[in-house]
Image (tube, rainbow, N blue to C red):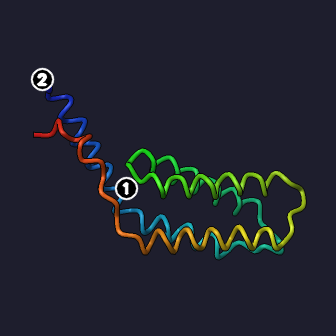
Amino acid sequence: MTGANDTDFFVRLTQANEDFRAGLPATLQRLGAAGADFDPATPAPALADDLQSLLHTLAGAAVTFGFRELGQGARALEQRLRVLTAFEHVGEDDWRAWLASLDDFVRSGLAAPAPAYHSAAFSLLP
């Protein structure tokens, strides 16, 4: 038997998923804009930190709301960024390659249709 609290939880979860999905284009555009501002010749640590934070948040939220591939892509970019920022000197070509991957990720995310959430998870809804 399903209680009112369970139903309320799934209603809130469904709304959170819809909010995430609706905000995804703006999040991806923000990520793309931050990448466009990143100068591989003189990488700004603060901008690298912002990119890492955006990717980390996106990766976690995407997986939480059933956007597995998006989350995995964001996590891979975040991990590669962590490696690059761990070194004192990183070649401009390495930064350019990472930025190209980021650009591909953003472009693909903006072009992809919104995936359906796992509807079986909401079987408790009336």
Residue furthest left in the image: 126
Q: Is residue 118 above or below residue 92?
A: above
Residue that appears at 56% across and 57% down: 74
Q: Quadrant of residue 5?
A: top left
Q: In which quarter of the image is the C terminus?
A: top left
Query: Circle 2 is placed at which residue position?
Result: 1
In the image, taking residue 115 as reference, residue 73 lies left or right, namely: right
Residue 95 image offset from top left, x and y in percent: 77, 69
Q: Which residue is at 58% across, 50% downward?
A: 56
Please tell me whether mark 2 sits on a helix, a strand or a loop: loop
**Front tag of 2 and 1:** 2
Crowding around mark 1 (Cα neighbors within 10 Å: few <14, some 14 to 19, many 20+) is some
Q: Residues within 10 Å of mark 2 (few under 14, many from 20)?
A: few
> Which residue position is annotated with label 1?
20
**Residue 90 coordinates in the image, percent (x, y):** 86, 63
Q: In this view, does 16 lie to the left or right of 10?
A: right
